[in-house]
């Protein structure tokens, strides 16, 4: 794939135009282009290979690329994003180095404005261009990335959209790089280094709460979950503080960052441990979102909080039956050391409420296997009892194509998490509604008056089958969704 994809105004570039299914006559906006390119668009239209279906691509000469946009009624930002994803592989195979994007001419504004068209196309291209190649060794047979692609457009809005799309997808790919880094390298201190480096590079502040400090602060959740590993836990706080933020908003994004989850003494059996390097994908999503927010210079004051630990077994590890005291003074009976995410998040959420005093909080976590059973890889589970905030999240998710589905969180669920010998248990006596148990547990660590949403991304943050936008591995789910939410905050 390409080494880089950038915007630019190339001298010699291939024209990219699209037509929906069933187009019989050349649409007016394309007539001038057709003339300038020796009637090759018309020629491409007549090709037997072209019906306008999603996936149709006809190349005419080396200067015209005609793509199918699919049924007029089903074109949306998702289909344009997917088109970008499929195209980038083809373009690379054809050794195309520059593209003149004119898709906006044939996509009606009521479906997508030119900026959104440019953004979705570029997002799709940069997301699909990503591969896990940084561990290719001496015996690798993969082709190394090569060449660069320059994206141009005569429409200024399309160019602006492409610039934005590239930033969002590159930030998503930064998130994916962290996720894909294996747990023997990606340990909590390594994540801290990555956070510090990203802060330096993108003009954010970064604070790291060390293991010693976490102990001093009484973060019983973070400390106990991480104590069994010689790679001790820590918590990173990234801060994006624009010069003139929209007044009245302090948004906090909190991400579960387990660099590895063996289950602890409640060990993961059979082959369920494999893949638990991805148990940091919530934190990775927050990390990527903070980079996007900083690079886009969004005018909102935002904090990214990453509680980070490794859940292992050792003579020092915590055990089922332990009773621990959390940062906010709530006591928890550990019934299952594999329900560890909620323990590190509980501390992070209550620390965030007390120290940051946010106006709203979103936490993102690969929290339960139950949400994978219930919702699969189709959408994340969403818990949010604040209707306006939930609507904002649902709208952001709709526009980025990172889908969410709401599940309930009632007083009955909260009561279910109360234990006999401590305030709470970290997991109930059975698996009934266990993704909701996780959300209910977390609610004890968020101040009542702060709008709060919990996203369980266990099913969507990595894929085991490639699709138009993703290779097998981390998807970076949440980076674009959180960035979009921030962009809409107070706007
Ligand atoms: N990290 C896991 C959840 C998970 C499972 C993520 C599969 C991705 C794929 C989490 O820490 C966990 O182990 N959850 C338990 C909770 C249970 C003990 C209540 C689970 O889902 O089994
Ligand atoms: Mn676990
Ligand atoms: Zn976990």
Image (spheres, rainbow, N blue to C red):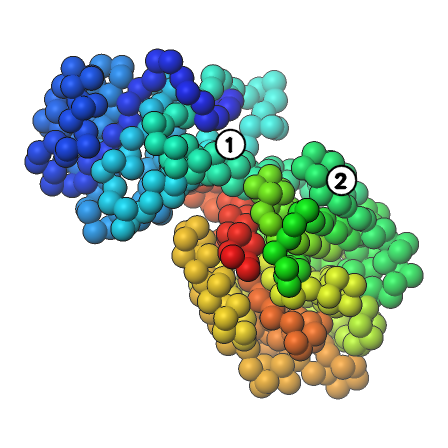
Q: What element carries label 2?
A: helix
Q: Distance between the residues labelled 2 and 1?
A: 24 Å
**Pair 2/1: label in front:** 2
Numbered mark located on residue 196 in the image = 2
Mark 1 CB near ligand 1 (8 Å cut) = no
Residue 158 position, x and y percent, is 38, 35
Q: Is residue 32 left or right of residue 196?
A: left
* Residue 455 makes an appearance in the image: yes
* Residue 316 makes an appearance in the image: no
Residue 262 position, x and y percent, is 69, 54
Q: Is residue 93 left or right of residue 45?
A: right
375 and 288: which one is in front?
Answer: 288
Eyeballing the image, is 364 above or below 293?
below
Q: How many marks overall?
A: 2
Numbered mark located on residue 87 in the image = none
56 and 311: which one is in front?
Answer: 56
Eyeballing the image, is 157 above or below 371?
above
Residue 7 position, x and y percent, is 46, 26
229 and 172: which one is in front?
Answer: 172
Q: Which residue is drawn at 33% across and 45% down?
A: 113
Q: Do the residues labelled 2 and 1 touch (CB within 8 Å)?
A: no
**Residue 41 occupies quadrant:** top left
* Mark 2 or 1, nearer chain start: 1
Write down the residue under mark 1.
131
- How many residues crowd around disc 1 within 10 Å: few (fewer than 14), some, or many (20 or more)? some
Q: Is residue 78 left or right of residue 423?
A: left
């Amino acid at each position: 794939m390409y080494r880089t994809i950038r915007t630019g105004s190339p001298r010699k570039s291939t024209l990219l135009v699209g037509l929906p299914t069933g187009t019989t006559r050349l649409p007016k906006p394309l007539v001038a282009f057709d003339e300038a390119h020796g009637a090759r668009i018309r020629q491409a239209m007549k090709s037997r290979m072209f019906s306008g279906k999603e996936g149709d691509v006809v190349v005419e000469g080396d200067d015209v690329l005609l793509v199918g946009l699919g049924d007029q009624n089903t074109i949306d930002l998702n289909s344009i994003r997917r088109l970008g994803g499929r195209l980038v592989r083809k373009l690379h195979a054809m050794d195309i180095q520059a593209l003149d994007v004119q898709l906006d001419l044939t996509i009606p504004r009521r479906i997508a404005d030119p900026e959104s068209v440019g953004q979705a196309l570029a997002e799709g291209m940069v997301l699909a261009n990503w591969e896990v190649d940084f561990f290719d060794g001496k015996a690798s047979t993969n082709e190394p990335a090569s060449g660069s692609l320059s994206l141009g457009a005569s429409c200024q809005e399309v160019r602006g959209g492409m610039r934005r799309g590239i930033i969002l997808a590159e930030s998503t790919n930064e998130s994916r790089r962290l996720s894909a880094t294996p747990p023997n390298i990606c340990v909590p201190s390594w994540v801290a280094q990555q956070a510090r480096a990203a802060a330096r590079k993108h003009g954010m502040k970064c604070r790291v709460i060390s293991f010693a400090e976490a102990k001093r602060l009484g973060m019983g959740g973070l400390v106990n979950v991480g104590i069994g590993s010689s790679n001790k836990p820590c918590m990173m706080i990234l801060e994006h503080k624009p010069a003139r933020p929209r007044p009245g908003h302090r948004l906090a994004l909190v991400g579960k960052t387990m660099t590895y989850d063996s289950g602890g003494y409640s060990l993961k059996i059979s082959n369920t441990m494999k893949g638990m390097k991805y148990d940091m994908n919530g934190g990775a999503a927050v990390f990527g979102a903070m980079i996007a927010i900083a690079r886009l210079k969004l005018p909102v004051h935002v904090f990214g909080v990453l509680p980070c630990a490794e859940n292992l077994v050792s003579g020092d590890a915590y055990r089922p039956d332990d009773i621990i005291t959390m940062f906010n003074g709530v006591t928890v009976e550990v019934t299952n050391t594999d329900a560890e995410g909620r323990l590190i998040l509980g501390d992070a959420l209550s620390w965030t409420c007390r120290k940051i005093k946010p106006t709203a909080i979103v936490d993102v976590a690969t929290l339960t296997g139950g949400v994978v059973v219930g919702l699969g890889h189709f959408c994340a589970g969403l818990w949010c009892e604040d209707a306006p905030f939930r609507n904002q999240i649902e709208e952001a998710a709709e526009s980025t194509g990172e889908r969410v589905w709401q599940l309930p969180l009632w007083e009955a669920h909260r009561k279910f998490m109360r234990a006999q010998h401590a305030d709470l248990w970290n997991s109930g006596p059975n698996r009934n509604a266990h993704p909701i148990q996780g959300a209910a547990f977390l609610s004890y660590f968020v101040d009542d008056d702060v709008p709060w949403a919990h996203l369980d991304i266990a099913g969507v943050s990595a894929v085991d089958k490639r699709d138009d936008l993703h290779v097998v591995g981390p998807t970076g789910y949440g980076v674009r969704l959180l960035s979009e939410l921030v962009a809409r905050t107070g706007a």
